[in-house]
Amino acid sequence: MKILLIEDDVGTAQHIIKSLQQHGHVIDHASNGRDGLFLAAGESYEVMIVDRMLPGLDGLGIVKTIRGAGIKTPVLFLTTLGGIDDRVEGLEAGGDDYLVKPFAFAELLARINALARRPPVSAVETTLRVADLEMDLLKRMVVRAGRRIELQPQEFKLLEYLIHNSGRVVTRTMLLENVWDFHFDPQTNVVETHISRLRSKVDRGFDTELIYTVRGSGYCLRGPE
């Protein structure tokens, strides 16, 4: 994957670049906003990682500019600003996801992979499939192996997010933010409870499981290998 990193902190940038390269990704790096904008507008990337606070031109200005130019590359904001208003401001500027410093690299990698798998806006599907599981987004209907599965609205939203990221590990934090819109940890077992309920409907009574727990990391929906 070709990734653009716009980050002015030398230590943070070196750590991200080295870690991503170890996972086989190609990284272009800019240490200030103006150079970052030049690369973002002139090259093709699958994901951009953009620091909010940058010399020359801040991250919000970069993303607003490229969105105004019709560039739809997914953007992950990095920031020390963890408030709800700061997150909303970044997302409204055109960002796709938000990660507060300090962060674990595993979380960064999971979010990058999730962003890279999002289909272009012009190619959004209305029917999602993984193995023998099918979700019709227009009819709000889920079927597995020809059997109708009744889901509550939040269960449907959770399953939709898992399918969109099928084959990838999604963390508890990602689920809280993208399914429940919690930009903080409510210190409840809401994720675990809903995953358990979803498993009982999607996996129980079928030959193979689709929803897996990845110990210490999160959850993954995938078809049989």
Image: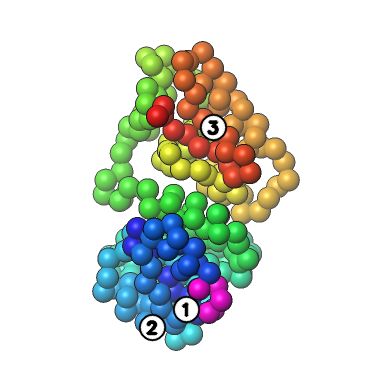
User: Which corner quadrant of the image does residue 127 belong to?
Assistant: top left
Q: Position of residue 46 (x, y in %)?
A: 33, 59
Q: Secondary structure at mark 2?
A: helix
Residue ranking furthest to the right: 187
Compared to 146, does 64 lie above or below?
below
- Write down the residue under mark 2: 34
Report if the CB atoms under discs 2 and 1 are less than 8 Å apart. Answer: no
- The residue closer to the viewer here, 172 or 212, is 212
Q: Secondary structure at mark 1?
A: loop
| Neighbourhood count class around disc 3 (C-alpha, 10 Å): few under 14, some 14–19, many 20 upward | some
First of labels 2, 1 by sequence position: 2
Q: Position of residue 2 (x, y in %)?
A: 34, 62
- Image disc number at residue 58: 1
- Write down the residue under mark 3: 212
Q: Secondary structure at mark 3?
A: strand
Q: Position of residue 5 (x, y in %)?
A: 43, 70
- Does residue 12 show up magenta in the picture? yes
- How far apart in space, not on screen, are marks 1 and 3 (Cα)? 40 Å
Q: Position of residue 162 (x, y in %)?
A: 47, 37
Quadrant (top left/top right/bottom left/bottom right) for the N terminus: bottom left
State the residue at coordinates (47%, 15%): 206
Compared to 201, does 156 lie above or below?
below
Compared to 208, does 42 lie above or below?
below
Q: Which residues are magenta?
A: 9-14
